[in-house]
């Protein structure tokens, strides 16, 4: 039970980190596309 709980918390942390990285990459790609078109 305790180990499973720990794993779930760790997984949520990983998910948060992954989402942050993903949105950061999306912003970079979007801004580079905008600068290309102008």
Image (cartoon, rainbow, N blue to C red):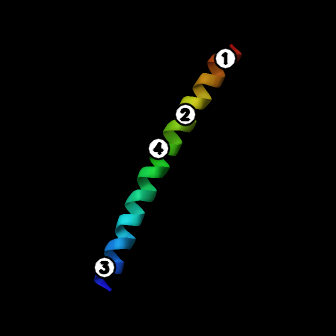
Q: CA distance from mark 3 to mark 2?
A: 36 Å
Q: Earlier in the sequence, mark 4 or mark 3?
A: 3
Q: Which element type, helix, strand or loop, lies under badge 2?
A: helix
Upstream in sequence: badge 1 or badge 4? 4
- Quarter of the image that includes the C terminus: top right
Q: Give above or below for 37 relative to 8.
A: above
Q: Position of residue 32 (x, y in %)?
A: 60, 23
Question: CA gap, disc 3 to disc 1?
Answer: 49 Å
- For label 3, count other residues whose C-alpha is less than 10 Å away and answer few (under 14), some (14-19) or many (20+): few
Are the residues at dot 4 and dot 3 in contact (C-beta closer than 8 Å)? no
Q: Can you give x and y, in whole percent of width and height, for residue 6 in the image? A: 31, 73
CA–CA distance in space, label 4 to label 3: 27 Å
Q: Residue placed farthest to the right in the image?
A: 37
Q: Nearer the viewer, mark 4 or mark 2?
A: 4
Which of pointers 3 and 1 lies earlier in the amino acid sequence?
Answer: 3
Q: Residue at x 71, y 17 (%)?
A: 37
Checking the image for residue 21, the label placed there is 4
Point out which mark residue 3 bears.
Answer: 3
Where residue 36 appears, x then y in whole percent?
Answer: 66, 17
Q: How many dots with numbers? A: 4
How many residues crowd around disc 1 within 10 Å: few (fewer than 14), some, or many (20 or more)? few
The disc, 1 or 2, on the residue closer to the chain's N-terminal end is 2
How far is mark 1 from mark 2, CA to CA?
14 Å
Mark toward the viewer: 4 or 3 = 3
Q: Is residue 25 above or below residue 18?
A: above
Give the residue displayed 54% in from the left and 30% down from the top. Answer: 28
């Amino acid at each position: 039970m305790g180990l499973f709980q720990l794993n779930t918390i760790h997984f949520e942390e990983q998910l948060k980190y992954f989402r942050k990285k993903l949105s950061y990459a999306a912003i970079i790609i979007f801004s580079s596309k905008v600068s290309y078109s102008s």
